[in-house]
Image (cartoon, rainbow, N blue to C red):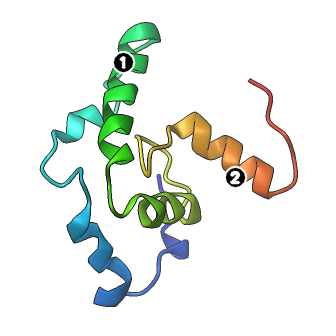
Amino acid sequence: MAEISRLPGPVMDLWEWQFDGACRDADQDLFFHPEGERGSARRRRAEAAKAICASCPVLNECREQSLAVREPYGVWGGLSEEERAAVLAERAGRRVTA
């Protein structure tokens, strides 16, 4: 579950960027893996989600938000769960090996 204590208060200016997300009209199932999905199926789905993120005008805002609240699931800001964990670990000063 996301760490909700890190979420900012309900101020529209802090969340308005979400209206410009390239994913707003996309199938949300593309961004979250179904239970048991592994290997090439998971990789292809994540790559398709990341392709949408790549053209997103609010990619950086989305990415930083997902890192700030430690989003546990899905592709956010063009990063998978594993990629977000690696970024957070690197920011904390430690390396993660795959």
Residue at the spot 38% in from the left edge and 37% down from the top edge:
50
Image spot of residue 41 (x, y percent): 36, 12
First along the sequence among labels 2 and 1: 1
Q: Is residue 38 visible?
A: yes
Residue 63 against residue 44 in the figure, above or below: below
Left/right of residue 23 with respect to residue 43 in the rendered view: left
Residue at the spot 47% in from the left edge and 52% down from the top edge:
1
Cα–Cα span, label 2 and label 1: 24 Å
Q: What is the three-letter code of the residue carrying label 2?
A: Leu
Write down the residue under mark 2. Answer: 88
Residue at the spot 44% in from the left edge and 67% down from the top edge:
61
Write down the residue under mark 1. Answer: 44
Q: Say which element carries label 2.
A: helix
Q: Say which element carries label 1.
A: helix
Residue 52 against residue 4 in the figure, above or below: above
Q: Quadrant of the C terminus?
A: top right
Looking at the rendering, which quadrant does residue 33 occupy? top left
Image spot of residue 58 (x, y percent): 36, 64
Q: What is the three-letter code of the residue carrying label 1?
A: Arg
